[in-house]
Amino acid sequence: MISTKSIHFSYGKGTNFTFPDVAIQRGETLLITGGSGKGKTTLLHLLGGLIKPKSGDIHIEDVNIAKLSDKKLDHFRGKNIGLVLQQSYFVESLSVLENVVLASWLATGKQATQKAQQLLTQLGLEDQIQKLPSQLSIGQQQRVSIARAIINEPKLLLADEPTSSLDDENAFIVANMLSGLAKQYGAALIIVTHDQRLKDRFSNQITLL
């Protein structure tokens, strides 16, 4: 179970957010929608432990990540939270395969090379693994981001506007990949988006007002 309660966050004195409570089981998908400036990405960053709330609780199973120290939060995130962000942040000097393996090494101290190869093959990238990320299309880069996010079998998988730059065909491919992998690995999947195509694809939604 992933759940939040009474989350409040502010950027200085000018911008304040009070978010609705969220609850989702592992293997389920939740869509978070809302207009520009309503805090969608801020909420995703809070759920991912990239920033901390001013008040409120964020539980990933029995751990309240809002109360963890920065060091413990970094360790917990690496093992339990997968992030597919709008900007991929690849290490450009490393190959596609090496970027995915790096995510496993940073979280566990082990290089899950075989698992990374299997994931990339599952995502249709078996012929791209030795290329640099810059040599891939946007859709292919998005799939590498998904492989990197799922390599450690996270309890929570977060995706920020994963289809915004994709055409219809690739948008639905990525949406189906995300939901399918979440079910396969028992992760709760939360997608932040303004993409109407995804609003029509997933029924479990909340809208930030």
Image (cartoon, rainbow, N blue to C red):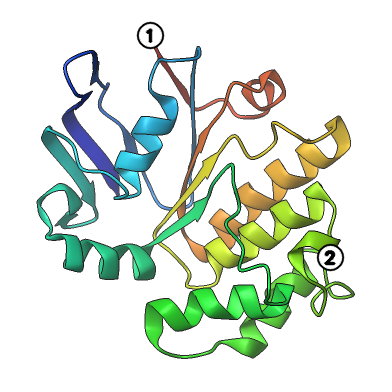
Q: Which of the pair 30/130 is nearer the observer?
A: 130
Residue 38 position in % (x across, y down): 40, 15
Q: Residue at x 65, y 53 (%)?
A: 180
Looking at the image, tell me whether mark 2 or mark 1 is earlier in sequence order. 2
Q: Residue at x 82, y 74 (%)?
A: 131
Query: Which residue type does callout 2 highlight?
Result: Gly
Q: Residue at x 73, y 77 (%)?
A: 95
Q: Which of the pair 100/6 is nearer the observer?
A: 100
Quadrant where the C terminus is found in the figure:
top left
Q: CA distance from mark 2 to mark 1?
A: 38 Å
Direction top: furthest residue: 209
For residue 94, which quarter of the picture?
bottom right
Report how many numbered discs are placed on residues in the image.
2
Instruction: Say the numbered circle drawn on residue 209.
Output: 1
Q: Height in image: 159 above or below 98?
A: above
Residue 117 position in % (x across, y down): 72, 81
Q: Height in image: 109 above or below 127?
A: below
Query: Which residue type does callout 1 highlight?
Result: Leu
Secondary structure under the numbered disc 2 in the rendered image? loop
Q: Height in image: 25 above or below 141?
A: above
Which residue does the numbered mark 2 point to in the structure image? 124
Left or right, residue 81 beside residue 16:
right
